[in-house]
Image (cartoon, rainbow, N blue to C red):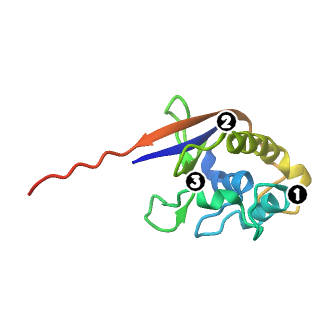
């Protein structure tokens, strides 16, 4: 089975904002609904919605259980390029994201960094929010399943 992971590399610990960033970039939230207001803004601002006003990313993103096996979410904290710090955000895709999807997520990542100015009413954007986007990458994840006779 082949899946893809879109990674946003940053200069800050991503556990402080990964679910909010995913909601802002894709309009999709996990079972915990963290970032719900940001997902709503995505759907209001984006042409990437279906006839019901839902993000078209909904069917493209895989919801994975968090590390505790609790709620499922479409993203996670991720190791940076040097595999030293959890400064990256991973967004899980069932299939390779299109160029249009990648372009949109990159564009919205920049607005996420600046978002605290426009959306200061939202609790997710604190006045001291400082974040720098260092780059983007896509990882191809291949799972091999082998049957072992017992």
What is the C-alpha distance between the residues marked 1 and 3?
24 Å
- Tell me if residue 111 comes above or below residue 80 in the rendering: below
At x 75% / y 44%, what residue is drawn? 104
Crowding at mark 1 (Cα within 10 Å: few <14, some 14-19, many 20+): few
At x 68% / y 38%, what residue is drawn? 99
Residue nearest the viewer, comparing 79 with 5: 5
Q: Position of residue 146 (x, y in %)?
A: 23, 48
Q: Residue furthest front?
A: 51
Image side of residue 105 versus residue 150, left or right: right
Contact (CB < 8 A) between labels 2 and 3?
Answer: no
The label on residue 75 is: 3
Q: Position of residue 94 (x, y in %)?
A: 52, 52
- Badge 3 element: strand
At x 76% / y 55%, what residue is drawn? 48
Image side of residue 124 versus residue 84, left or right: right
- Tell me if residue 52 comes above or below residue 73 in the rendering: below
The label on residue 11 is: 2
Q: Which residue is mark 1?
A: 120
Residue 19 image-quadrant placement: bottom right
Q: Nearer the viewer, mark 2 or mark 3?
A: 3
- Badge 1 element: loop
């Amino acid at each position: 089975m082949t899946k893809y992971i879109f990674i946003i590399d940053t200069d800050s610990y991503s556990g402080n904002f990964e679910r909010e960033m995913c909601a802002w970039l894709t309009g999709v939230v996990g079972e915990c609904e963290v970032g719900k207001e940001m997902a709503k803004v995505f759907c209001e601002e984006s042409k990437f919605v279906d006839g019901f006003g839902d993000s078209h990313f909904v069917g493209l993103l895989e919801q994975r259980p968090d590390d505790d096996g609790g709620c499922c979410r479409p993203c996670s904290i991720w190791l940076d390029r040097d595999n030293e710090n959890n400064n990256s955000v991973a967004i899980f895709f069932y299939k390779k994201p299109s160029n249009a999807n990648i372009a949109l997520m990159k564009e919205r990542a920049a607005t996420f960094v600046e978002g605290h100015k426009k959306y200061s009413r939202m609790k997710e954007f604190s006045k001291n929010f400082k974040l720098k986007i260092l780059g983007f990458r896509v990882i191809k994840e291949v799972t091999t399943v082998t049957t072992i006779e017992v």
